[in-house]
Structures are given as C-alpha cells and as structure tokens.
Amino acid sequence: MSEVLTAIATPRKVSTDAIAQQALAAEETETLRAAFAMDRLRRDNIDWVVTLFLAAVHAGALIAPFFFSWTGLATCLLFHWLTCSIGICLGYHRYLAHKSLKLRAPAKFMVLLAGSLSAEGSPLTWAATHRLHHQRSDQEGDPHSPLVGPWWSHVMWLFVRRNDFEQETLYRRYAPELIQDRMLLFFERAFVFLLWGQGLALVAIGALIGGWSMALSMLLWGMCVRMVIAYHSTWFVNSATHLWGYRNYDTRDESRNLWWVAILAYGEGWHNNHHAHPAVAPAGHRWWEVDITWWSIRVLRAVGLAYDVRDQIPRGRGTNEAVAA
C-alpha cells in the first residue's frame, strides 16, 4: 500500500518543485528587469562612485594634451591593446561570458588581470551582465538596448545604482558556475586595489624616468586617455552596432556588423555574427571582417596556452555545416 502511495505522491512532488522553480525564475526575471530599467535612473538612485570616476577619467583625457609625451602615448597604446583586446574582448567576453575557448592557468590569470585593469567592471559583473544582454537582446530586460535610447545604451545605463540583492540575483541566474571559481573570486576582491594600483604604478614609473611632469603624463595618457578610448569603443558595440550596419544572419534582435566599430573594438564590431553564433571564438565570418582579437587567440593556441577553441564558423543560421576559421 505504501508503495502505491509513494508512486502517487512522487508526480505531485515533482510538479510542486517544477512550479516552485518556475515561480523563482519569474521572480528573478522581474528583479533583473527592474534593476536595469531606464526608470531606475533617478537622482536618488545614481551610482556616484561610477559616475564620478567616469567624469574624472574624461576630465583627465581632456587635459592630457597639455602633458603630452611620447612615452605616455606609447603607454596609452600598449595598455589600450592589452586591456581592451586581451582583457575585455578575449578574457571577459569570449572566454568568460561565452566559453569560446579554454585557457591554461597562466593565460587565464593574465587575461583576467588585463580585464580588471580596463576598469570596465569586475569579471563576474561583466560576464553575467553580458549573458543577460544576450538572453534579452533588444527586448524588455536588456540592460542596454539602443531601442530604449541610444545614449542609454551607450553610457547612461552605467549610472544606475543596483543593490546587493539585485547583484546576487544576477550572479546566481547568469554566472552560477563562475562564482565557484577561486581565481575569479580573487579578482573580484582585488578589483578596486588593482584599479588604483595601476594609477600609482604609472605615477611612480613616470617620476623615476622623468620627474613629476612625466609622472602626470603617464597617468593622464596611460590611464585616462586609454580608458576613455576603450570605454567608448566598447560602448559603441552596445549602441552603434544595434543601430547601423549590415547583417550576415537573421537574428531576433537588431544586431549589425559595423566596420569602424570592429576596428576600434578589436573585432567586436562584427556584432551580428556574434549574436547569431555567440559561442564561436572568431567574430569575423567573412574574409574582409578583420578580427584582431582572434589573431591573439590563435597565437595562444599555437603556444599551448589556449585549447578547445570553438573555431567552426557555421555557413548559415541553424545549419550544422561549418568551416574552420
């Protein structure tokens, strides 16, 4: 008799669990929709740390020409490539958010360090927010759709303050496996220290090689100018490539391929390609679609620091036929 009752009760329990999971998912979806909604941008809900930091960096970039040096310019260009292409495009985006490749520990540490030095957010926040963007792209709940407003998608969405519960919900829903990674958690905790540490390091190096004038030049060019260019390059991927350009694939969103954003953002401007096949490591799917970040991935693979690279570019949307990149 007990076996019969167990058999009858089990489907009810499974059904109850499924209903509870659906209710939790719906609650999390609503929490995140509200967290990234445009109406959250109010005077009493501004993230002043982010806002003032971005304002200071832009101000520094404006006065940088008055403290020009070739050493500062060289530092700017080197750090721009390192933090934007290697850190954000390769590390945060293709490696963390989409798992387009795997990295050996030394390479993993270096790309996460480069990403942290970019000051575009901690690795968990960046990857989880980007995954949310892909799931809700150009729909309600997208963190930065230009269909809401071009300036909203470009920068204004960053000014909104989000509470700890919303942040934890974002991690739990969109980065559950990443919050178990010890190296990632290290960079989460060290993010602020690394961010300010690089500024102090640039000042110290500049002072040693050329006094306080060179120290200021290194800080303004190596940090402020470099960050402002990298910021807007990344933000154009959120805004411009959902507004202008051509499409290789029929996707449910408004993603486009835009050549000048691809140049500025080391290949990320081939955005329609990416939204059609987000797990593919190369962003350029046609011979003329140059993807500088993909070149770096190929080098890492050649020396054994990258492996299981997803380099098969589908010939069309929804087909299994592919060609090696």
Image (cartoon, rainbow, N blue to C red):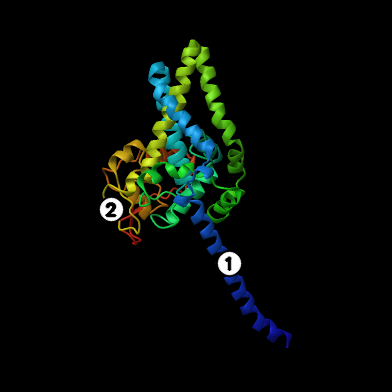
Which residue bears the numbered disc 2? Answer: 248
Asked if residue 293 shows in the view, the reply is no
Q: Is 65 left, or right, of 104 in this rendering?
A: left
Observer-nearest residue: 277 or 294?
Answer: 277
Q: Is 110 left, or right, of 58 in this rendering?
A: right
In space, the residues marked 2 and 1 are separated at their CA atoms by: 37 Å
| Rendered position, 22 above or below 100 | below
Q: Residue at x 44, y 50 (%)?
A: 38
User: How many discs appear?
Assistant: 2
> Quick one: which residue is furthest to the right in this view?
2
Report crowding for label 2: few under 14, some 14 to 19, many 20 or more residues within 10 A (C-alpha).
Answer: some
Residue 222 locus on image (x, y percent): 45, 24
The secondary structure type at the circle numbered 1 is helix
Task: Check the picture and name the quadrant holding the N terminus.
Answer: bottom right
| Rendered position, 24 above or below 111 | below
- Residue 320 placement: quadrant: bottom left
Residue 105 locus on image (x, y percent): 56, 40
Q: Residue at x 50, y 42 (%)?
A: 43
* Amino acid type, mark 2: Asn
Observer-nearest residue: 37 or 319?
Answer: 37
Which residue bears the numbered disc 1? Answer: 21
Q: Earlier in the sequence, mark 2 or mark 1?
A: 1
- Residue 197 placement: quadrant: top right
Observer-nearest residue: 214 or 283?
Answer: 214
Numbered label attached to residue 255: none
Q: Nearer the viewer, mark 2 or mark 1?
A: 1
Report crowding for label 1: few under 14, some 14 to 19, many 20 or more residues within 10 A (C-alpha).
Answer: few
* Amino acid type, mark 1: Gln
The secondary structure type at the circle numbered 2 is loop
Asked if residue 89 shows in the view, the reply is yes
Q: Is 139 left, or right, of 18 in this rendering?
A: left
> Quick one: which residue is furthest to the top in this view?
211
